[in-house]
Image: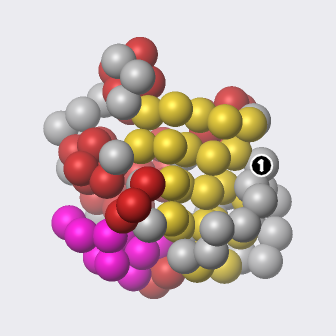
Amino acid sequence: MTYDEILNRFKEGTVVVPGKKVKFDFGDAGKIFLDGGANAVSNEDAVADTTIKVKLEDFVAMAQGQLDPTAAFMQGKLRVEGDMGVAMQLQGVMAKLRG
């Protein structure tokens, strides 16, 4: 799964956390911004309630069920900046990627 494929799946499913702004920061690979207020998905580098920093390959492994998000967090492969409660709601986002 490539960055563009992930971005398109998010856009097609309008995958957001209602009322919250979440940014996935894949470093040099790009960013995905989920705007739960505007119900929109983009590749903007905007200010978010929660920013998830993870390498693209680790994110893909999580999306495919090969890497547990909690294990990734504990191993330092996934970092959360901002509202941890929003991060906990992202399991539904990952499920939509698999679907």
Locate the N terminus by quadrant.
bottom left
Would you say 81 lies left or right of 3 here?
right
Q: Is residue 2 above or below residue 54?
A: below
**Does the magenta run of residues contain 50?**
no
The segment highlighted magenta reads 1-10
Q: Position of residue 45 (x, y in %)?
A: 64, 68
Bin the neighbour count of mark 1 within 10 Å (Cα to Cα): few under 14, some 14-19, many 20 and up.
Answer: some
Work out whether residue 40 or residue 51 is closer to the camera in this orientation and state it.
Answer: 51
- Tell me where residue 68 appears, x and y as whole percent: 30, 29
Q: Position of residue 56 (x, y in %)?
A: 31, 53
Q: Inspect the magenta stretch and tell me whether residue 2 lies in it.
A: yes
Seen in the picture, residue 73 relative to 83 is either above or below; the reply is above
In this rendering, position of residue 12 left or right of residue 52? left
Residue 65 image-quadrant placement:
top left
What secondary structure is found at the residue carrying circle 1?
A: loop
Who is closer to the viewer here, 74 or 99?
74
- Horizontally, is 55 left or right of 1 in the view? right
Q: Quadrant of residue 72?
A: top left
Which of the 4 image quadrants contains residue 73?
Answer: top left
Which residue is identified by label 1?
A: 49
Q: How many marks?
A: 1
Residue in the image at 81% along x and 69% along y: 37
Q: Is residue 89 visible?
A: no
Residue type pointed to by label 1: Asp
Most distant residue in the front direction = 28
Q: Is residue 99 above or below residue 61?
A: below
Q: Quadrant of the C terminus?
A: bottom left
Residue occupying image coordinates x 44% and y 66%? 30
